[in-house]
Amino acid sequence: MIPINKPCIGEEEKKAVLKVLDSLQLTDSSFEGGKFVREFERLFAEYVGVKHAIAVNSGTSAILAALMALDVGEGCETLAPGFTFASTATTSLFLKAKVRFVDIDLKTYCISVEDLLRKVSEKVKVILPVHLYGHPARMDEIVEAAEKYGVNVVEDSAQSLGSKYKGRMTGSIGLIGCFSLYATKIVTCGEGGMITTNDDGLAERLRMIRSHGQFRGYDSKILGLNLRMPQIEAAIGIEQLRKIDVFIKARRENARFYNEEFSKLENVRLPVEEDYAETNWSIYTVYVKRRRNEVVQYMRENGVGATVYYPIPLNRLEVFLKDIQPESLPNCEDAAEHVMSLPVYPTLTEEEKNYVVKVFKDAIRKFL
Ligand SMILES: Cc1ncc(COP(=O)(O)O)c(C=O)c1O
């Protein structure tokens, strides 16, 4: 099976893990974090172009900590797109805030600015735009709307490390950026996350939240958790981040190859890269007009791990049903019914790429 994604792990990552094991310092609960964590944070902040990066143990922890740092809680409302991974929005529920879903733009699958403008108000505490599949959301308009109503912007950049909006790195535009370093992400440490911000006060709060609200050890000042990134993960992350330009270049080439190969297919809409965007192609997603599930099943039966991100819009996920008002999100419904993603990871061979193209074309001919 050609999987939907494959981490690119080399000798450098293996050596880095052994180095941590040899040091016998597997973690560090201090405010600053351990040696490898601090180095990973420094490199990450430099790469994204922000003052602070705070390493945590997952992308979900990154979003949760960001919302906690902004005092999101009971009585607060957050706005999130209705088509994304669940934890963009479940994190609000944890804090007893009310989440309201916004429709998406069917061209980029990112939050619809038009629907956002209908729903944003002074009542909203945080907007969570998601750079879905790596494609940046329309940040200027989102930030402008947020500023008009005094709302904070927390970018869910889980899938968009290295993607640029008008030349600026995603995760550096809103007040806070949240990244995932999960195994399928463009840069991974297995599990992990990173929070970025230019705000000194927020960075300090975030560092405390990640380790029980402590500042100088056993002095919990605010509510926190154990969201720390272990040293082994940080050491892997350092090596991965050093290779990110190579990873993105290969993904861009693979996406360009698919776009050319599929350009003449009827009943299929190819992913776009808007003029303002430079995407990392963390996920390559096509829109299939009919019988999407059969196309996916056929591909899987023929050895290609085609995957649907995501088959159910958030407003219909069971976990949200008791907490949300019914909302009409036609584009989220449409995307959930029609999109499917193909392997685009950097180490795909020519032979594998050609095979993916062949099987997809066969499926389209067969079912559409
Ligand atoms: C858009 C989005 N938000 C949040 C997350 C959560 O990240 P993690 O799985 O590292 O907790 C993910 C990861 O899949 C994601 O894709």
Image: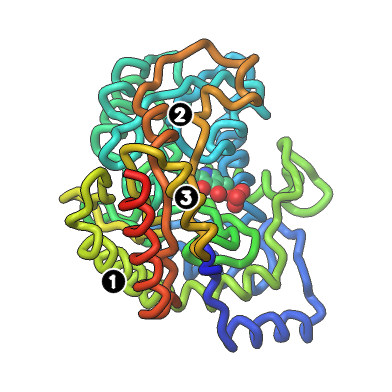
Label 3 belongs to which residue? 296
Residue 103 appears in the figure: yes
Callout 1 secondary element: helix
Quadrant of the rendered structure where residue 20 is? bottom right
At horizontal 29% and vertical 56% (from top left) the residue drawn is 164
Q: Residues within 10 Å of mark 1 (few under 14, many from 20)?
A: some
At horizontal 52% and vertical 74% (from top left) the residue drawn is 240
On screen, residue 264 versus residue 350, left or right, reads: left
Q: Amino acid at mark 3?
A: Val
Vertical placement of 88 versus 179: above or below?
A: above
* Quadrant where the N terminus is found in the figure: bottom right
The Cα atoms of the two marked residues, 3 and 1, are separated by 23 Å
Marks 2 and 3, the one that precedes in the sequence:
2
Query: Of residues 34 and 232, which is closer to you in this image?
Result: 232
Label 1 belongs to which residue? 253
Query: Of residues 24 and 113, which is closer to you in this image?
Result: 113
